[in-house]
Amino acid sequence: MILRPGQVRHLDLGIGKGREEPHLDGLRARHPCTVARPTYVVNRLSVWPDFRDAWIVHDDPDILVVDKPEGVPSQAADPDRADDVVTRLRRHLGGAYLGVHQRLDQATSGLLVFARRREANASLAAQFERRSVRKTYIAGVTGWPDGRERVVLRGSIEGKRAVTRAKLVAHCGDRSLLELELETGRTHQARIQLAEAMAPIAGDALYGGAPAPRLMLHASEVELTHPGTGSLMRFVRSPPPEFEAWLARGDPGEGVFDDDGALDRALSRALERRWGLGRSDHGPRATTAFRLANEAGDGLPRLAIDVYGDWVVVHLYGDDGAWAAPARRERVLDKVHLLGFDGVYLKVRPRQPSVLTREADSRITALAPALPVRGAEAPSELAIQEEGVPLLARLGDGLSPGLFLDQRGNRQRIRSAAGGKSMANLFAYTCAFTVAAALGGARRTVSVDASLSALERGKSNLEHAGVHPSSAHTLVVDDVFNWMDRAARHGERFDLIALDPPSYSTTKRSRFVAEDDYTALAAAAMDLLSPGGRLLACSSHRAISPARFRRMLFDAGRKAKRAVKQVKDLPMPGDFPVAPGGVRHLKSAWVTLA
């Protein structure tokens, strides 16, 4: 008999230090499940190729000119996941020599010139150094005054002279396309100077740009002397179709889903932005589960797409409004399936997901079908990897596959900090934080959750990773507040605590609302920390701003009468970008006690 949380006050899943309460040793025998190993049927080179021939504008024995797409960086941010244009191009060319003289921001598209051989490199280097190479950009801006056809923007950036010549190309409403010629080459020169001229580039979150499907900046023209022939060469590549569409209509918003071309381009941009993750399916940092497209941050409002191995999960936010029209849903699902994955699962997330439970709302089956809506079915338990950590997911099991992908960075932080430490994982769900801590060398973990079914999956996760529940790694079915109260009375202390509660939760003993109760929850957790202990505090409640979250954590320290040495904000993974003017949904912080 499997006992549910309401039937016992405390239930350990594991050895539990001599307790006589029931545990789950026999669950696998009574409810066998097959852990599927990754097969990776999808050819990732077809979804994420090294480079695309269509991006090559000119190629001869001396020089190579490419049209870099938006989303491809000029330099890799992570050397272990080299996704920059140079690395990708060299792979495409079989390791051929490339002399590099230019850079473009990751969000900027356009022309880049490379030397094909060392003998040609010196000439190109001298031309770029003398600034005799003429470079022209097209920028989409808002706020450009009517009648200002030509303007010279002068100033300094970090104390260095900066000059940009701007010419009006087209104008519609408050939107304009400008042709820019940069006399100097300072970092973010055009972006900074146009923002200072009260005409920021659209899509530029850093400098106050208006909403747009992408950063509206494109390197459209390069003119130079050919290092081999000495002739003047001029290369031109018009800006992508988004520029003309933005000029005519502005940011498409949810209208992107009704325009096949715009939708194709948005999905293509998302693929290029995730190339480094898409090709990280092997090695010590293998990652086969991540976010492919993150709502408005990737120009797809109220739509998110997650990759799980060879499958994708499509999340549609709000079961009305944008997704009320069946034709729009079907178009999105068709387009996603064409990306090349084995199958597509659907999760329609209502505006008030807290009211949905398996017992209370039969709509769950319609909102999250158990079978894929396109393509082949995934294994019932799908093996994935996250930074080299093996985990399990169930793509057809309700609204959540069992893994919150936005916590990838935090799980890596816990793994790095866990060596020789004790950790409590509160609201443990399927115990992904526990797996990370155990593989990081934690000497003891306790995972607490009110859901028996969630901890059953947590036990499978641990065993799949080669960690067997025992006196060192205990799973406890209980209300977190009750467990913390009992642990405090017994004098238990932990070096690390992971605290990631839902925004709303209800058990037979308590009700939790993050906006009202997070401070008390964090204070109770701090009471269980050893001197110098660290709390990984997280909240996905959108009504709590990052500034308010910090205040809550300092208030929690005062409430617990513990000296807070540091509250360090933690970033979200790069596959969860925020739209211009938006606020990240996940707030995370390391709280270190004195």
Image (tube, helix red, strand yellow):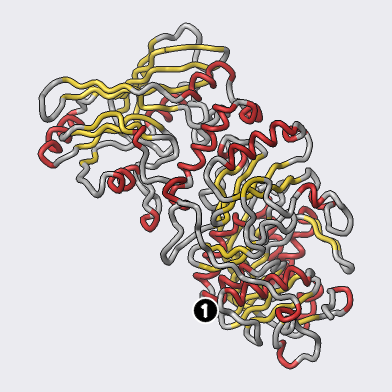
Residue 82 higher or lower than 167, as above or below: below
- Residue 32: x, y in percent? 70, 75
Residue 458 higher or lower than 71, as above or below: below
Q: Which residue is mark 1?
A: 441
Q: Residue furthest front?
A: 376
Of residues 364 and 160, the one drawn nearer to the viewer in this rendering: 364
Q: Quadrant of the N terminus?
A: bottom right
Check disc 1 and give the amino acid type.
Gly
Residue at 56% over, 59% down: 408
Q: Quadrant of residue 380?
A: bottom right
Residue 26 higher or lower than 594, as above or below: below
- Residue 182: x, y in percent? 31, 24
Residue at 31% over, 33% down: 56
Residue 27 higher or lower than 175, as above or below: below
Q: Residue furthest bottom?
A: 18
**Residue 546 visible in rendering:** no
Lateral position of residue 358 relative to residue 71, left or right: right
Residue at 63% over, 62% down: 379
Lateral position of residue 326 relative to residue 535, left or right: right
Q: Quadrant of the C terminus?
A: bottom right
**Residue 467 visible in rendering:** yes
Q: Determine whether the residue tagged by mark 1 lies in a helix, strand or loop.
A: loop
Q: Residue furthest top?
A: 147
- Residue 370: x, y in percent? 73, 54
Lateral position of residue 261 relative to residue 365, left or right: left
Of residues 228 and 370, the one drawn nearer to the viewer in this rendering: 370
- Residue 81: x, y in percent? 40, 55
Q: Quadrant of residue 529?
A: bottom right
**Mark 1, residues whose alpha carbon is within 10 Å: few (<14), some, or many (≥20)?**
some
